[in-house]
C-alpha cells in the first residue's frame, strides 16, 4: 500500500487534474489524502465569501466520497491571495511528516492561475524541506517523499513524462467534478476534463481516456538513469515500467533529460 497526497489549490482542481488517478489509487488500497490550499471562497459574484467557502468545502466532501477518499484537509488560505510564507510552510511540512506520503501530486509550474503556481512553489519546496533535519518548528520527524508528479488544470502540460490510463474510472471522475455544482454553473469543467483526457488518451497512443503528468521528482527515475548511464540507450518502448504507483509508461522524455 502506498501513501498518496494531493495538493489542490481550490476544491475542484485536484479532481480535475488527477481525479482518475486518485480513484485508481483507492482501488488498489492506497491511502489518499487531499489537501485544499484554499476553500475557493472567491469563486462567485453572487454568493458571499463566507457562505461560498462553506458550500465549496461541502462540495469537496461530496466529491471525495465519490473518489473514495476519506481524509480531506482544508488549510483555508484566502482564495486568490495564496502566499509563499512561513506559516504555510510549517503547516505543509508538518502534514507531510505526519502522513509520510510516498507520492505527491501538485499543479505544474506553468499553470496560468496564480494560486496554482503558488501551490506548486509551496508544495514542491515543502516536499524537499520535509526531509531535512532542520525546521524544528515543524512537527514530526524528517520524511523524504519518493516521487512528485505535476498535473494539468488550466494550462495543458507541454512536456509529458507520465501517463495514467483512466478509461475505467473516467465516469466516476466526471461524477466527482459535477459535485462542484457552484462552479460548473458557469464553466463546464466536467466537459473540459473529459475532452482533455480523451485527447490525451488518443495522442499518447493509449486510446480511451488518460491523465498526463510531468515528473518533478522521483528517486526511482534517478536510479534508473544512473544504471543506464553506463549502458547503451534502449528504445523508448523498452523503458522500464514503474508500476508501484499505477504509472503506465516511462517516456523517452525522461531518457533525454
Image: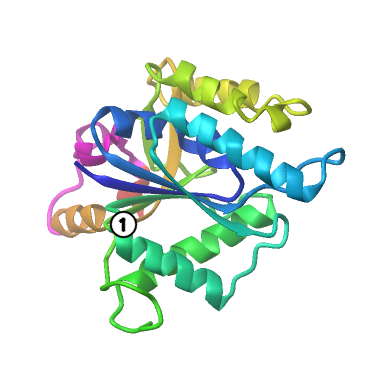
Q: Residue at x 71, y 27 (%)?
A: 184
Q: Residue at x 75, y 50 (%)?
A: 50
Tell me residue 84's x, y (percent). 60, 71
Classed neighbour count for the residue bearing mark 1: other residues with Cα under 10 Å, few (<14), some (14–19), many (≥20) = some
Q: Residue at x 21, y 53 (%)?
A: 220
Q: Residue at x 77, y 49 (%)?
A: 49
Q: Nearer the viewer, residue 31 or 49?
A: 49
Tell me residue 101's x, y (percent). 30, 54
93 vs 155, left or right, is left
In the rendered image of this protein, does residue 241 appear above or below residue 173? below
Instruction: Tell me, yes or no, whether the highlighted magenta stretch contains residue 190.
Output: no
Q: Could you say which quadrant of the image residue 83 lies in?
A: bottom right
Tell me residue 214's x, y (percent). 43, 46
Which residues are drawn in magenta?
230-252
73 vs 94, left or right, is right
217 vs 92, left or right, is left
Tell me residue 185's x, y (percent). 76, 25
Query: Mostly what secondary structure, the magenta segment?
Result: loop
- According to the picture, the residue beneath numbered tag 1 turns out to be 99
Q: Nearer the viewer, residue 70 or 193?
A: 70
Residue that sits furthest to the right in the current view: 46
Amino acid at each position: 500500500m502506498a501513501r498518496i497526497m494531493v495538493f489542490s489549490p481550490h476544491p475542484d482542481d485536484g479532481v480535475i487534474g488527477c481525479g482518475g488517478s486518485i480513484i485508481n489509487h483507492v482501488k488498489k488500497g492506497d491511502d489518499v489524502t487531499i489537501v485544499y490550499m484554499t476553500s475557493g471562497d472567491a469563486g462567485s459574484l453572487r454568493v458571499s465569501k463566507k457562505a461560498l467557502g462553506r458550500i465549496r468545502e461541502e462540495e469537496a466532501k461530496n466529491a471525495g466520497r465519490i473518489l473514495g477518499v476519506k481524509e480531506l484537509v482544508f488549510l483555508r488560505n484566502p482564495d486568490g491571495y495564496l502566499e509563499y510564507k512561513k506559516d504555510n510552510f510549517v503547516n505543509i511540512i508538518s502534514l507531510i511528516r505526519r502522513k509520510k506520503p510516498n507520492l505527491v501530486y501538485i499543479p505544474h509550474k506553468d499553470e496560468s492561475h496564480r494560486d496554482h503556481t503558488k501551490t506548486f512553489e509551496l508544495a514542491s519546496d515543502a516536499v524537499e524541506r520535509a526531509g531535512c533535519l532542520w525546521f524544528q518548528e515543524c512537527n514530526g520527524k524528517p520524511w523524504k517523499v519518493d516521487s512528485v508528479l505535476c498535473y494539468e488544470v488550466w494550462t495543458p502540460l507541454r512536456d509529458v513524462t507520465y501517463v495514467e490510463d483512466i478509461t475505467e474510472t473516467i465516469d466516476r471522475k466526471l461524477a466527482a467534478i459535477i459535485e462542484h455544482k457552484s462552479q460548473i454553473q458557469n464553466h463546464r469543467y466536467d466537459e473540459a476534463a473529459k475532452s482533455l483526457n480523451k485527447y490525451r488518451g488518443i495522442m499518447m497512443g493509449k486510446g480511451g481516456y488518460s491523465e498526463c503528468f510531468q515528473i518533478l521528482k522521483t528517486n526511482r527515475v534517478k536510479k534508473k538513469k544512473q544504471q543506464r548511464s553506463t549502458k547503451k540507450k534502449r528504445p523508448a518502448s523498452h523503458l522500464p515500467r514503474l508500476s508501484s504507483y499505477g504509472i503506465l509508461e516511462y517516456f523517452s522524455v525522461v531518457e533525454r533529460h
